[in-house]
Amino acid sequence: MIQIKPVGDCGVLVELGDSISEEVNSKVMELNRRIHGLSVEGILETVPAFCSVLICYDPLKTDYGAVSKVLSLLSESLEGKTGLRGKLVEIPVCYGGSFGPDLSFVAEHGKITEEEVIRIHSSRDYRIYMLGFLPGFPYLGGMDERIFTPRLNSPRTRIPAGSVGIGGEQTGIYSMDSPGGWQLIGRTPYRLFKPEQVGKPLYEAGDSIRFVPISQEEYKEIKRNQEMG
C-alpha cells in the first residue's frame, strides 16, 4: 500500500512498499522520473531509495498539501507497473591480493575457492537500488547467496576509494576513501565520485552494474588513463 508522509517542514516521503524487490524499486524509479518530468514549482530535489522517494521542496514556494496532492495522483498511476530499466555499466575489478584482502575469508565462509568467489561475483548483473552512505556508493541487489558474508566485527578506519566489498547479502563499491566494515574482495581503477563533473555520472539508481575481472597490469593501465583524464 502506498503511503505519503510529511518529513519535517519541507519534505514529503512516498513509500511504495515495505520489502526490497526489483518490482517495488522499479516503481520508485518510475515515480522519480515522472516527478522530474513535471517540473513542479517549488520542488528542489528527490532522493530515491529502496522502497521510497523523498521529495524536498521550498516552503516559501509551495506546501505539503500541494506537493502531496501531485504525488498522490502520480503514485496511483504506478499501480501494476514496473517502471523502466536503466543502463548496464561494466566496472573493471582487480580481485584479491592487496586490493581484496578479505577474498580468502569470503571463500572460506562459503566453503568454495577464491576463483569461484570471483567467478560467482562477476557472473551476473546487479541492480543499483539506491545511492547512499557515501556520494556515489551503489547499494546493489541480486548477489548469489553462495557468497553472502557477514560484515567485519571491527570496521576499518580507512578503505581506499574503488574498493569492492561484500556486506551480508549485498555487494557495493566504496566511491571514496572512507571507514567501513564490508569484506573487501577487489578494487576498481575507476574514479567513481567526481564532484567537479558536469553532466550525468557514470551510473545512477535504477541502472545495473556488471563486474569484469582484470589483471593488476590492466588495473595500472586503466588507473593511469583515468588520472590523465
Image (cartoon, rainbow, N blue to C red):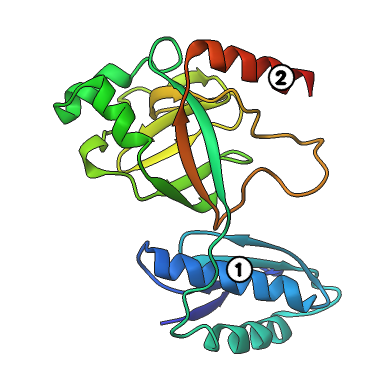
Q: From the viewer's perspective, is the residue at label 1 or at label 2 nearer? A: 2
Dot 1 crowding, Cα within 10 Å, few <14, some 14–19, many 20+? few
User: Residue 225 shows which numbered tag?
Assistant: 2
Q: Work out whether 73 lies above or below 155.
A: below
Q: Quadrant of residue 145?
A: top left
Between 106 and 219, which is closer to the camera in this rendering? 219
State left or right for residue 53 relative to residue 168.
right
* Distance (Cα) linking label 1 and label 2: 44 Å
Camera-nearest residue between 71 and 210: 210
**Do callouts 1 and 2 mark residues in contact (Cβ within 8 Å)?**
no
Q: Position of residue 195 (x, y in %)?
A: 77, 36
**Mark 1: amino acid:** Val
In the image, is residue 72 above or below residue 132? Answer: below
130 left or right, relative to 10: left
- Secondary structure at badge 1 equals loop
Q: Amino acid at mark 2?
A: Asn
Residue 12 shows up from this direction: no
In the rendered image, which quarter is residue 71 located in?
A: bottom right
Residue 125, disc: none
Would you place residue 58 above or below residue 100 in this image? below
Image quarter of the C terminus:
top right
Circle 1 is placed at which residue position? Answer: 7
Q: Residue at x 54, y 10 (%)?
A: 217
Say which of 61 and 53 sits in front. Answer: 53
Which image quarter holds the N terminus? bottom left
Point out residue 205 in the picture as x, y percentages from the top left corner: 57, 54
- Counting labels gives 2
Which residue reaches farthest left? 111
- Tell me the element at label 2: helix
